[in-house]
Each structure stands twice: as C-alpha cells, then as structure tokens.
Amino acid sequence: MSLFNIFNVAGSAMTAQSQRLNVVASNLANADSTTSANGQPYHAKQVVFSATQVGAGDAQGVKVLAVVEDNAPMKMVYDPKHPMANEQGYVAMPNVNVVDEMVNMISASRAYQNNVEVLNTSKTLLIKTLTIGQ
Amino acid sequence: MVNKLDDALRFQQTALTLRAGRQELLAANIANADTPNFKARDIDFAGALQNALAGTSGKLPAAQTSPAHLEAGTGSSVMGAPVLYRRPIQPTADGNTVDMDVERAEFADNALRYEASVKFISEDIKQIMQAIQG
C-alpha cells in the first residue's frame, strides 16, 4: 500500500532534517569555542544527505550518510590578552560561518514543515479511503 | 454478475492505485529536496492509466540478439508504467532537480484528484446498491 509508505518516506526526511537542525544548533552554540576536549578549536560540522530505499516501493527516503567536519581554515583573531593566543598574539576561532548556519537553519525548518504537510495530506487521503462504500 | 460489478469499479480502482503510487513518488521528491544528485521522478499519469486499463505495458520492448545485451525496461515502475525523470526548470549546482514549487503543486493536485476518485467510487457503489435494493 503505497500511501502507507509515504509515512516512511516523509518520516525519514523529517529525521534527517532534524539532525541537520541539531548540527546547526551545535555549530551556532560553539561559534566562539576556542578550545575543546582535544585542545583544538571547535570545527564546524555539516550533514551529508543521501537518498535511500525505504519500504517496498520505488520511492526513496532520506538518510544522513555522514556528519563531516568543515575543513575551512580557522578564523585568526588578534587578541594578545586571550589565554589561547599564540606567540604572535592571534587566537584561532572556530570556522563556523554564522550566516551560513542561519541559512541552513531556515532551510532545514522549511523542509521539515514541507514534510509535515506531506504526512498530513497522506493521512487525510488514507482516512478518505476508509470511507469508500459508506 | 461479479464480473460486471468488477467492471463497474475497475476504472476508478485503477485510477486510485495509480494516484497512490504517484503520491508516493511526489512525497519522495519533496523528502529529497536537499539531497545532492537526487533526480526528481514522476509518471505519465494519462498514459499509465490507459496502459493499465488496456492491460498493456508502457515499456518499449528491446530484442536481445546476444547474451551480452542488457535487458531493457528493468527500471522501476508503478503498475507497469515506467518511472520517468522530471526535466528540471532551474537545475542546481549540487545536481538536485527537485523544484519545490512544482512538486508541491503536483502533490496538492494529485491529492485532490485522489479524493475525487474516492468520491466517484463511493457514488458508483451507492448506485449499485440502489440497483440491488430497488
């Protein structure tokens, strides 16, 4: 029954988008974290989406293939008084691009809403299907 | 007698099954709006319905004159109708061909037509009941 599979497809997309939102939250929260457990400044993280088979139908859902670290260079800020400053007085700040992250956040939020709509429509159609012959 | 009842409902039943299959494909397109290299897919509904009612397949046969030839028409299908790729209006740099406006419009359109078919099949059943009960 293909209408039931829509729940799996839209559900997988919602899971993936919420994971993306989670990564955005982590990046924004750590935009100023100059050190972490391994002593390095925080590296921005990005999710990689991949189409994947869900259920028996042809339709493909989404899964998060990997969470990769952004290898953009760290932002070097001149602040000699900072405890993490190097000999030249520069502090390595995380490579989080706040503007990019805000765009990512809006995109993830809209995509999530889209899938909620898809789920609701499918639910309505299934309920209508149950009324056949009444 | 049962055959005639079957015939009376066959058209709407076929249409409903195809609509449900198409709904699933459109849901998958919306779900994969942010997946790199995902190609939006759809079926040719009018052709698919005609073929399904006539009991023919919309696939083009290909003769295999050598065992090394690849088999044609092994791609995915909805009730025998081949799943086609959408021609992108605004292709993106990441190879994704999902146009959210197109997909949302088609999704809403397909949902409405599904509901219409549900209504029609219910009315067909009511008519048959009326004929039986007098």
Image (spheres, coloured by chain):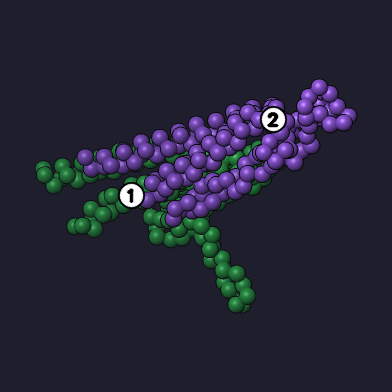
Chain colours: A purple, B green
Residue beneath the point at 11% across and 43% down: B134
B108 lies above or below A78: below
Query: Quick check: A83 left or right of A14?
Result: right
Evaluate whether label 1 is on the same chain as label 2: no
Given this view, does label 1 or label 2 mark the residue nearer the observer? 2
Q: Position of residue A81 (x, y in %)?
A: 81, 22
Report the front residue among B85 and B57: B85
User: Which quadrant: the N terminus of chain B?
Assistant: bottom left
Residue B20 visible in the snapshot: no
Q: Position of residue B85 (x, y in %)?
A: 58, 49
Identity of the residue furthest to the right in this view: A88
The amino acid at mark 1 is: Gln
Q: Secondary structure at mark 1?
A: helix
Chain letter of the residue beneath label 1 in the structure image: B
Residue B100 image label: none
Query: Alpha-carbon neighbours of circle 2 within 10 Å: few (<14), some, or many (≥20)?
Result: some
Residue labelled with disc 2: A33
